[in-house]
Amino acid sequence: MYFCEETPVRLSDKHIPLVEELLKAHAIAYVEEAGVLRCELSAFGLAHSVVYVVSAENVFTDPDDSAQQTERRLNRLQLELFAAEYEVTPRKALYLFLVWDAETDQNADYMPHRWVVEQNLKTAKKAIMQPADVLTWLQNPFPSRHADARANAVPLFSAMRPFDFPGQKVPEASQWLSVRDELSHIENTYADPSFEVLKPLISDIYRRIMGSMYKVFWAEDTLRLGQLYDRQGVMLEYCSEGERKVFALAGFLARMAKDTTAGLCIGLPSTFDGVDALRQIGAYDCLRDFVASTGVSVEIQAAQSERRALALTRIRCVVEAAGGHVVN
């Protein structure tokens, strides 16, 4: 595998052998070619997404490099990696995982460069991670509850404006996400043993949506949100609106995944207002995995047509593969 700069340069495969060992140990299928791993994500026999894994050294060479240099290397890499995917119809969702070691992952000098890469939404969604994280990000984070969830229903997905939900086509959601109520619930149950089991899943969902340099700090008496480079994060009430909404969604989905019942329909009323495009894509991808594991129906309300279209693009294929239908 090559990409062109002034002269052809072979891609570094520095961390790829370790990732391969992990994938083999967990029986995850992949194809390797010249230092590049290709994996497919599927549900109900449908391959809906493709993940490419490369060593981060192909994009990050020195923390003193300019953001423009990082972006140029990234764009060249994407052009080479995804050329064949452009010819496939229908086109699958594309992901690019850049892998480096733990020491570099904790190096705050690379934060501006991480930001440049993960904010680049051209062609593929990007994530930067350590080798072991590849396993986590390739697997559906939600526990499979197919039999219970699909006992009496198939999943339905709808994305409409808040004021035009047709009741005859869309079932009334039995669980609506209220960001304020969800955050209050989390704070009130934080010390309960029942909440303890949800923490890993909440952390996983939050990081998948926000990006690889974000994390949840679970202190003994309170929780904080921040970045990998922070010592303790920021208390919830001082976080941005987007961070609070994403964290509320993570808590809500973790609870719904644990308590899934047959025919459950969840509703997200304008949840993504004030959330940027990068986090919207992450949220819709988590909802796609949620539907694939649970069979739960989902209603999204959004006033903006582009947000409804993005949600449909990321989720429709899995709902239809499961035998469900989409209303829009």
Image (spheres, helix red, strand yellow):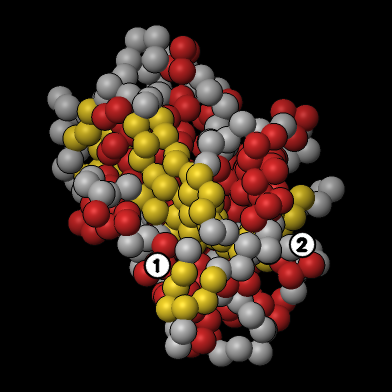
Q: Position of residue 25 (x, y in %)?
A: 69, 34
Q: Secondary structure at mark 2?
A: helix
Q: Position of residue 292 (x, y in %)?
A: 42, 30
Callout 1: 10 Å neighbours few (<14), some, many (20+)?
Answer: few
Q: Which mark is residue 219?
A: none
Q: Nearer the viewer, residue 213 or 98?
A: 98
Q: Nearer the viewer, residue 292 or 15?
A: 15
For the point 47% across and 27% down, the residue is 293
Q: Are marks 1 and 2 in contact (CB under 8 Å)?
A: no
Q: Which mark is residue 102?
A: 2
Q: CA distance from mark 1 to mark 2?
A: 27 Å
Residue designated by label 1: 80
**Residue 325 horizontal side relative to residue 281, left or right:** left
For the point 59% across and 80% down, the residue is 112
Of all residues, the one furthest to the right in this rendering is 220
**Residue 28 horizontal side relative to residue 22, left or right:** left
Q: Nearer the viewer, residue 129 or 216?
A: 129
Q: Position of residue 232 (x, y in %)?
A: 79, 64
Q: Position of residue 294 (x, y in %)?
A: 46, 25
The C terminus: image quadrant: top left
| Mark earlier in primary sequence (1, 2) | 1
Is residue 173 in sight in this rendering?
no
Q: Nearer the viewer, residue 314 or 14?
A: 14
Vertical arrangement, residue 131 with respect to residue 233, above or below: above
Vertical arrangement, residue 23 with respect to residue 65, above or below: above
Of all residues, the one furthest to the top in this rendering is 151
For the point 67% across and 84% down, the residue is 63
Foreground mark, 1 or 2, reads: 1
* Number of numbered discs overlaid on the protein picture: 2
The image quarter containing residue 102 is: bottom right
